Image (cartoon, helix red, strand yellow):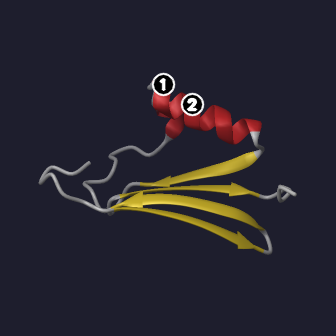
Amino acid sequence: AFPSGEGTIWVTLKEQTDGLFLSVSDNGVGIANPNLSQHSSYGYELIQALVDKLEGSLEIDGQRGTQVTIVFREYQKAA
């Protein structure tokens, strides 16, 4: 992700009226093909399985660095 050895990773969790948004992004080199259905690594399979289990949606943007956004439309706050 960081050929120079240095980079930044941001993690953001936002509650909005239409859901809970979890975003993890970096300023690395990006990802050439962000389409999860074309990857067979265990990491991608694990992310997709967790998103499916929690009935969320997943979007990956690899243009400038990599940004992974998971949206949970239906969730309950812990008591």
In the rendered image, the vertical position of residue 75 relative to residue 15, given as above or below: above
- Asked where in the image residue 49 lies, by quadrant, the reply is top right
- Asked where in the image residue 9 lies, by quadrant, the reply is bottom left
- Which disc is residue 60 wearing? none
Which residue corresponds to mark 1? Answer: 42
The quarter of the rendered structure image containing the C terminus is bottom right
User: In the picture provided, is 35 more to the left or to the right than 31?
Assistant: right
- Which disc is residue 46 wearing? 2
Residue lying at 66% horizontally and 36% vertically, measured from the top left: 50
Q: Indicate the secondary structure of the residue bearing disc 1.
A: helix
Q: Are marks 2 and 1 in contact (CB under 8 Å)?
A: yes
Give the total of numbered labels: 2
Residue lying at 75% horizontally and 36% vertically, measured from the top left: 53
How far apart marks 2 and 1 lie (CA) works out to 6 Å
Q: Residue 75: image x %, image y %?
A: 83, 55
Q: Amino acid at mark 1?
A: Tyr
Residue lying at 61% horizontally and 36% vertically, measured from the top left: 48
Q: Amino acid at mark 2?
A: Leu
User: In the picture provided, is 66 more to the left or to the right than 45?
Assistant: left
